Every structure is written in structure tokens, then in C-alpha cells.
Image (cartoon, rainbow, N blue to C red):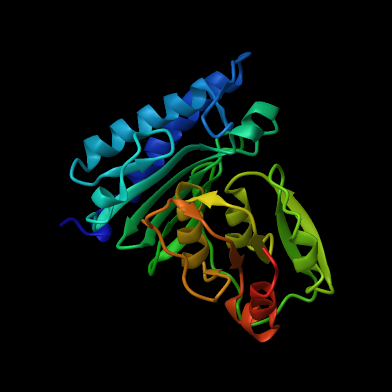
Amino acid sequence: MMKSGKIDLEHLVQLAFRAGRAILEVYSTDFSVEKKEDDSPLTLADTSSHRIIADGLRSLHPHIPILSEEGKEVPHSTRRNWPLFWCVDPLDGTKEFVKKNGEFTINIALIEGQIPVIGLIHAPVSGDTFLARVNEGAWRIQEGRRQELKLDTASFPERVRVLKSRSHPSPHMESLLELIPRHETIRKGSALKFCAIASGEADFYPRLGPTWEWDTAAGQAIVSASGGVMLDFKGRPFIYNKPSLINGPFLAAANGHWLSETGILPKAASLPL
């Protein structure tokens, strides 16, 4: 079996750039919007990006299966036998794409067992790319320059910068925020919230509503590789390739010690979600 350490990260970056250019071609037009069965939006950009990424990954690594939001549904009876697989959201934040606010991304993750070990998030509008190989490091690529992302976990924030979804509000979020006396909120769309944690621009991203595995896998790898954490409400590592691809609530933070020592984790677990 091919190991994750053999994956050439630069190939993934170039593949994401190609998909990003295809997305921007659609973004500049008066594109039409369809509705999927779950009432979420679908555009030509979603399907074009999916095709480019899926074809590229199969060409580079034909023996690694692909799980993509816009691909065919794969039953757990098949997936549970995958030791390694790609988890892809070819256009995360389609609602932001439709609103034309620029806050959408391409997410590519490699899952080994049930844990993301490689993550890439590319923002086509800004051109920023966030990349990680867990246990090796995380980086931000801007205009061809690569900067290592390494979070300061030695100190706690005096005023906690909390990320909230731009298009997916939660009725229980205010109850959680009451547990953090000194905080400010930052709204961002798509997986850019994970990037804000990894780059030190925010401290805490609680997600109370449902997400899909392809929404979070790349972001989890990037946050983890930069020194942060992503846990479920019982304090356990967040896992993938579950029988249901729908995620439960999670807490992503730049400082795992802050989560435990301030008591946020047990208090969050007691919320009536």
C-alpha cells in the first residue's frame, strides 16, 4: 500500500490551481444555480472542479480511491475497507460562491485509517493556499512564497477570537459564547475558518450544526499540523470514514490547553444540542 509520505504535495497544489482557474471562469459569468436533493446549491463550477480534481488524482495515484461531494455515493460496506483515500470538496462554500463574496475554497484531504494526514485548502479568489502534512508541518502559500504555520500554544488569548459561519447560523451558538466572557466574533464562509485558526488570525471555531466529512477533513489536517486541535464534544479526536458521512459537532482551537484548562470542553458537552 502506498504511504501518505510518498504523496508529492506540489502536485496537489498545482491540481488545486487548475481547479481554481476553472471555478473562476464560471464565477465571472452569469452562471445558473441548480438544487441538489438536500436543497443545497450546485453550479457548473462545482462539477468542473470535481472533474479536474478527480481526473488529476486518479492520474497521479490510481490506486487511492476518491470520496468527493460531487462524486458517486460510496457505501460504507465498501469504504470501510479503504486504508487510504482522498476526501474532496471541489467547491466548499457554494452559497458564498453564489453570493459572489469570494469566501469559497477547494478542499483536498488524504485520510489514513480514520485520520486526515494531508490537507490542502485553496481559495481561488485570493489565490491563498494552505497546505499540511501532519507530523511534518503546515504552510501558507501566497504569490509563490511558502510560509510555515506554527501556532503559539504557550499562552492563552486574553480576548478570544471566535469564528462563526457566515451562512450556517446555529441557535445554540450564543449559549456557547456565554461560556467565554471576553470574546469577539469573526464571520467567515467555507473552510477559510480553519485557515484563520492555523494562521493565528482566530483562536476558536466551534461548530454546533452538521457538516460533511469533505467539509472538514482538509481543515483538520491543517489545524493539527500547525499545532492546533480539533475534537468532538467529548474531547476525542475527530474521525472519518464513519458509516454516516455527516459530522457531529466539533471544537477547533489554536490552543488545546486553553480548551481543557478553561473548562470550555466539558461545558460545551453539556449544551442541549
Identity of the residue drawn at 74% across and 75% down: 157
Looking at the picture, does residue 71 appear above or below residue 250? above
Q: Nearer the viewer, residue 87 or 142?
A: 87
Q: How far across and how far down the image is residue 103, in percent?
A: 65, 39
Residue depicted at 22% across the width and 59% down the height: 3
Number of marks in picture: 0
x and y percentages locating residue 267 in the rendered image: 70, 78
Residue 149, placed above or below residue 97: below
Q: Relative to residue 41, is residue 29 depicted above or below?
A: above
Where 255 falls versus 76 (above or below)? below
Report whether residue 88 is seen: yes
Q: Position of residue 95 (x, y in %)?
A: 64, 33
Quadrant hosting residue 41: top right
The reply, left or right, for residue 248 in relation to residue 188 is left
**Residue 77 spot, x, y in % from top left:** 26, 51
**Quarter of the rendering occupied by the N terminus:** bottom left
Q: Residue at x 70, y 33 (%)?
A: 101
Q: Which residue is at 33% across, 34% downward?
A: 54
